[in-house]
Image (cartoon, rainbow, N blue to C red):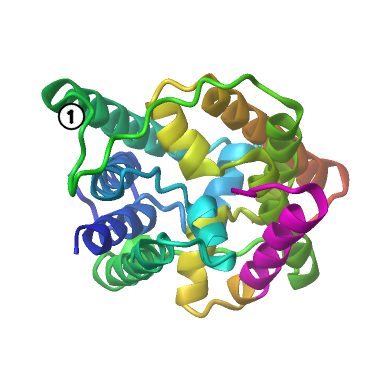
Amino acid sequence: MHVLLAGVIFGAGLAVSGMTDPARVTGFLDVTGEWDYSLALVMAGAVGTFGLGQLVWRKQTKGRAWFSTVLPVCDRSLIDRPLVIGALIFGIGWGLSGFCPGPALVNFGALRIEALVFVPLMAVGMILARVLVGADRE
Amino acid sequence: MFSASYSPWHALVGGVLIGLGSLIATLATGKLPGISGVVSKILRRSKGEMGWCVIFLAGLIGGALLAFALIPPAAVYRPQHSLPILGLAGLLVGFGTRLGGGCTSGHGVCGIGLGSRRGIVATLTFMAAGMVAVYVVQHLSGGPRP
């Protein structure tokens, strides 16, 4: 139930913030055009809420979460080549489409044709990353 | 405050909701709910994690569809480019997010929110790459404008 509620809140946030509209995303990335700063406000709201929330929670509970789970801690591993190259490739696809995975899934759910094309190929890309370069092996 | 047309308040309130949803999912599972990671766990049928991942994505889509229906500016949708370009973009987004270990939510919201250097570097990198891609498409090739 908690996870379902979390998903509903997250999804509503994506829609309310305008991030499910690809033109609003490319409007942010189009820095030499008529710049749309909305995405920066969305990130500030999301990072601020998540960051402050987890910090306060961690202080109050010594790092425990619900259902005897533990709050994840910051990944302190080094900046490596896969991180940067992966982010570069993702960024190009993001700029070309205005879709990152969350909004793409939402528009897939809304049966919008662009996302019906995008999401299956995104899944193929994820599987290729695992098969070809061993990403995501646990 | 919440006008009938899109305003900066929508961006800020929507952002807070994204952060809150991420926080609740984290507290409930002990895992970071980066969307690309969640999708990948479903694709590879990750043991013990399939359940919450499917429920989270169902909620994500349901919550957004609800907002589309109730809040008119949320339903605005202006797709970019032709389907072949979007297909290519899908491949790049899928491959890149898994190679880099996260997307806008995992690296951007959760990573930066935890103060992770990897999250900050990844986010600055994909934003810069996205800006270059948009510049090339919209200004150099004279391609379609929104």
Main SS, magenta region, reads helix
Question: Does the segment drawn in magenta span residue A126?
Answer: yes
Residue A104 visible? The answer is: yes
Above or below residue A80? Residue B70 is: below
Percent x, y of residue A3: 26, 58
Residue drawn 74% across the image and 67% down it: B87
Question: Does the segment drawn in magenta span residue A18?
Answer: no
Chain for numbered disc 1: A
Residue drawn 48% across the image and 56% down it: B38
The amino acid type found where label 1 is placed reads Trp
Percent x, y of residue B25: 29, 50
Q: Residues within 10 Å of mark 1 (few under 14, many from 20)?
A: some
Res. A38 image quadrant: top left
Above or below residue B80? Residue B125 is: above
Percent x, y of residue A57: 18, 29
Above or below residue A80? Residue A46 is: below
* Most foreground residue, A1 or B18: A1
Res. B91 image quadrant: bottom right
The residue at the far left in this view is A60
Query: Dot 1 lies on which element?
Result: helix
Percent x, y of residue B86: 72, 64
Quarter of the picture holding the N terminus of chain B = top left
* Most foreground residue, A48 or A79: A79
Residue drawn 47% across the image and 58% down it: A20
* Most foreground residue, B50 or A9: B50
For residue B104, side relative to residue B60 (left or right): right
The magenta-colored residue range is A117-138
Q: Dot 1 corresponds to which residue?
A: A57
